[in-house]
Amino acid sequence: MRATTIKSVLLAAPVALVIGTAAQAQESCPKSGGTLTYAYSQEPSALTTIVTSAVPVSIISTKMFESLLNYEGGALEPKPGLAETWSVSPDYKTVTFKLRPDVKWHDGKPFTSADVKFSIEKIVRPYHSRGTANFGKVSDIATPDPLTVVFTLEEPVPYFMKVFQPGEAPMFAEHSFEGVDMSDIAAVRGTSAMQNPVGTGPFKFKEWQKGSHIALERNPDYWRKGFPCLDGIVARVIPDGAARAIALETGELDLIPMSGMPEAEIERLSSAPELEASREGSEALGPNMWLEINLREKPLQDLKVRQAISLGLNRQRIVDVIWYGQGTPARSLLVSANPYFNKSLPEYEYDPAKAEALLDEAGYPRGAGDVRFKLRQNFLPYGENWVRLGEYIRQELSKIGIEVETRSADLGGWLRTIYTDWDFDLTSSFVHNYSDPSIGSERNFGTASIRKGATFTNSMGYSNPRVDELFAKAAVEVDPAERRKQFDELQQIVHDELPVIFLMEMSYTHVWNRRVKGFITNGISMYSPWDAVWKE
């Protein structure tokens, strides 16, 4: 039974080796041609997830970069991608991939096993925000021939076959980084290969006119013959949410993905006959909203202060009023739909009077102007709702004597302030749980993830040896029952210690014009390559 569990959870069934995704099963495009135009709430700050895995970057980059596997369904069942087949050793510590023989980089050079080894060892593992979590147990990557890659693991990793997603483990051309000091993160992220991407994906980078659009064009040499269906993709920059909604309504846009416009507009447009709205296609992401707390600052180091901040915020009101009911109050580092969610965790209270008492106990009485102390808040620059959330937090905390200064910045400035400079007290943010807690959550709460410059990691400076120990055990535990116990304890600790103030489990809604077909294929559909998406 134990071996069966490992095979099914860790490795995927052997039959998966020869079956493609639902999109790949399609032998030809129903119709070819046309350009897909979409807009999100923010302009991307980069073109690869190595710089940041922020939503706007993940959407655009995954059309240019691929990984070894594709995935099917909400649970992300592994299917062939750049690798045609794979096999696993009896001890589950060696995974061998056989690569497709006909894959070319966008510059025409062949894709080989050397590129895979280079990508994981020199770029993904050291510089991706989840690189260590995903590939930390890889002890060796061998390339016995140009089309064979052998991963040797220190121990069986239960989630290993889920990490070869295009946004998690994008493949890079080794020859594009000639002369670059790969040990220098600034040099790697600043190289021309990151600014003018060369991938293997169905679409090639064409141009980026800052403040206007990013344009991709069809890759005529794509390994999947006859695909992609579209001639190109354009990511428009439309900062105003109402303007984005109007552009979709009038046909100027084909798609607004991942709740990329105000919820009031989503609600209004959901009934439009020419549009389709769906919450499907994001099941494997699990977006979780919280306030990150800079634990380096003295008032916030006190648990009673963090508890008071939590007690001073009405989560249900945040859901109902700011997000128009598109979510549920959060109480864990995992969303409730995650299979490892700890259902025994109590919901957080809303009790301003109790918050005041805790602040008094912590030694922060009201002083001049009725203020106990001041905090700096940076809100996530993802649109109007985040501005409203920042205003709500400022108003509510003022009621318990905490004066909040709210600071705004564009996405690049916000990322630098929070993850490079650590120059904040509170910041609103959200992260994705992904298909496994070891992939999606360790990066936020593990001590090893306190790394300047690594975005969407442990900005708080939170460090708990028991949490680190539990993450380490769960990363290699193949017994689901034991692994559940580890994650249950881990969630309880973080729930009680509040390194972040959990706010809301978010719900993504994608809205698109019905003339576009084939978006929803798996649990990360907006981070999929869109090679089989077509337009009437």
Image (cartoon, rainbow, N blue to C red):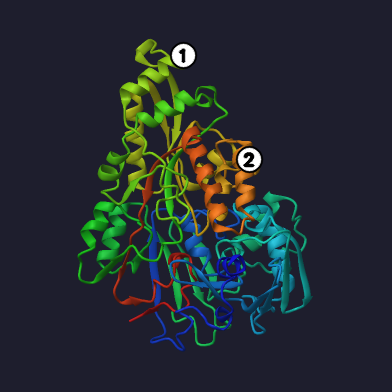
Q: CA distance from mark 2 to mark 1?
A: 29 Å
Give the x, y percent position of residue 9: 56, 66
Name which residue lies at 74% across and 56% down. 182
Q: Which mark is residue 196?
A: none
Residue found farthest to the top:
368
Determine whether, in the image, residue 282 is placed left or right of residue 226.
Answer: left
Q: In this rendering, is residue 319 above or below 107?
A: above
> What residue did someone put label 1 on?
363
Question: Which tag, 2 or 1, sits closer to the chain's start?
Answer: 1
Residue found farthest to the right:
144
Give the secondary structure at mark 1. Answer: loop
> What residue did someone put label 2 on?
447
**Image marks 2 and 1: residues in contact by CB distance under 8 Å:** no
Name which residue lies at 35% across and 29% down. 312
What's under tag 1, amino acid-wise? Gly
Give the x, y percent position of residue 531: 48, 77
Residue found farthest to the front:
1
Give the secondary structure at mark 2. Answer: helix
Which quadrant, please, contains the N terminus? bottom right
Name which residue lies at 33% across and 51% down. 240
Determine whether, in the image, residue 469 is placed left or right of residue 506.
Answer: right
Give the x, y percent position of residue 351: 31, 27
The reply to whether residue 455 is in sight is: no
The reply to whether residue 212 is in sight is: yes
